[in-house]
Amino acid sequence: MTQLYVLFEHASGFCLFLVKEFEEVGTFLPQVEEAVTQSSKFQQVVKLVGFKAFSSAASALENINAVSEGLLTETLSAFLEVNLPKPEKKNVIQLGVSDAKLGAAISEALKISVTHIGVVPEVVRGIRTHLTFFIKGLTPASMKQTELGLGHSYSRGKVKFNVNRVDNMIIQSIAIVDQLDKDINTFAMRIKEWYSYHFPELARIVTDNYQYALCADFIKDRNTFTQESVEKLEEILMDSAKAQAVFDASKMTMGMDISPIDLMNIERFVKRVIGLSRYRKELAVYLKDRMSSVAPNLSVLIGEIVGARLISHAGSLTNLAKYPASTVQILGAEKALFRAIKTRSNTPKYGLIFHSSFISRAATTNKGRISRYLANKCSLASRIDCFTENLTSVFGEKLRDQVEERLKFFDTGDLPRKNNEVMSEALVEHNNVLQEDVKTRKRKLDEIVDDKAVENDEAAQEVPKKKKKKKNKQEVKETVPVNDVTVAPEEEALPDVPEEEALPAVPEEEALPDVPEEEAVAEAAVNGPIKKKKKKKKKKTESTEVHEPQVNGGEELMEEVPGKEVPKEKEADYLEVQNDMNDEEPVMETVPTALGTKKNKKKKKKKAKQEVSE
């Protein structure tokens, strides 16, 4: 018994269906066509076996691209191996697919029988129509959305080409060049007819259309054309004899006078034609550049214009590469070919390649031979350009040399070189050119890297210098207010009292007559920690560089010490003692630890209290 399974590829995933009662369905094909239109009847004919959803849009695009090219992906292969039963002697399994190429790949990989004819197309059409009834969660809206997204991505992938090797621009540019040639020729004839009413002799002297338009734009009214203008006319015509002939003819012309309005219209039309002619030259340069990048070998062999016309007539460079040499030979002469076949006359010997210089240089009896040989070489050159990744013009130059040797052989009888020798030489030169290109690219990259490294080093050297200058400036700015803060308390201690008034002249023996030594020691003990605290505060302000007033000044500490008020008579003595203590500050830089200072303070306070009480 034969079991038919049908594979269906959808934007959401792969589906595998089992066709029930395959033999009866195969014999009654019209009934299957009727069942396709009704979902209830079609579900009785087909049963869903397995469904594999795509994990992402990228995987869907990858699988669909492979299916369109007839390739079997790992996802599809694993899906079929899991869901298809193994063939047995009694049960013969046959898989139906919609693409014959894909069927051949599946049959070769999985060793199963595959078909794409008979009832399979109708079953696939029914599955496509009623797919939402078989898969749960798949709605018509979501199905359309997935199909639309995959369709857009698939189309973009097919349209994508290498930007530097796109032949569409060549097709459009050669079409514009041919159209401009016709239009410029027609417009130039119109200018000659129009301007000949005023100066008819100019058309016989200047035959080139572009030069005639330039002369008409320069001369304008022949009555204003003088001998001084002949030198400028020589620059246009590049011939002094022609310029002098134009001047002589302008003085003896038989043309009629023309009104300024008519002359103005002629001038405007002439400038338009000159602009078109210049644009045509620019377009020819652009076409040459595009041909050298897309098909360098074909352009070197037969020329840019003829090569572009061959590509345009074939539709693309790929189509031209697929054509045999016999088709390339008569490409462009299809009407003559069909007419010759219809009338049973001689077929044409050449088509677009007739415009090549090789055929015009050959003798009449050898034109057919050289056209056939040239078509063969053009076919080879187009295939090299289409299917080679790294393009060079070496093969085109060698093929052109072969055509030249064949022309000499037809004229003189000298035997040309064999194709094997020429191609081996071309291959060696091609590899050498590629190696040189790689070396030049490496050199350029190294130069760019070295330049960037030098720039980075210079920048790294310049940036720290700028930062140091800024830091020095900031330090200068910050040290000024710190000095002001630290000096201020000393200056404000006795702002208006000079040293002589504050400390009157007292003999050394009578320095401290009334103050006992114990009181002086007590004052020194009391004032010692105060000066130390002031010193600490100064150091803190210098380190933090924050302008804050001293909170715990000497006055607050003095208030903490209870005792009798110091008499006014002894103020000078106290001031002298304090000045002596200030002078001895550098010696008292050793600061005890925190615990030691506290104990010493307590002891000194007790001693001071006792002495004051006594």
Image (spheres, rainbow, N blue to C red):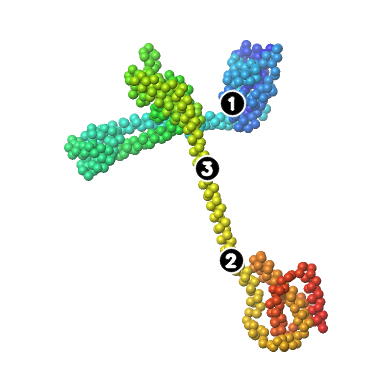
| Residue 543 badge | none
Residue 476 numbered mark, or none: 2
Question: Where 586 falls versus 184 (above or below)?
Answer: below
Q: Nearer the viewer, mark 1 or mark 3?
A: 3
Looking at the rendering, in which quadrant would you find the N terminus? top right
Q: Residue at x 65, y 12 (%)?
A: 23
- Circle 3 sits on which residue? 446
How far apart are the two marked residues, 3 and 2, measured between alpha carbons?
Answer: 46 Å
Q: Residues within 10 Å of mark 3 (few under 14, many from 20)?
A: few
In this view, the mark in front (3 or 2): 3
Q: Residues within 10 Å of mark 2 (few under 14, many from 20)?
A: few
Element under disc 2: helix
Which is more toward the observer, 521 or 233?
Answer: 521
Observer-nearest of 470 and 450? 450
Image position, residue 171 (x, y; %) = 43, 29
Name the residue rendered at 38%, 34% in the picture.
284
Helix, strand, or loop for circle 3?
A: helix
Residue 76's spot in the image, x, y percent?
A: 64, 25
Depth order, front residue of 471/230: 471
Q: Which is nearer the N-term, disc 2 or disc 1?
A: 1
Residue 333 makes an appearance in the image = no
Q: Name the image quarter holding residue 532.
A: bottom right
Residue 66 has which mark?
1
- Residue 367 at what x, y percent from top left? 35, 20
Q: Residue at x 71, y 71 (%)?
A: 589
Image: 477 above or below 39 = below
Left or right: where does residue 592 sit relative to residue 189? Answer: right
Front position among marks 2 and 1: 2
The amino acid type of the residue labelled 1 equals: Ala
Q: Judge from the rendering whether residue 103 lies leftward or rightward of residue 339; answer left or right.
A: right
**Residue at (25, 36) in percent of width and height:** 195
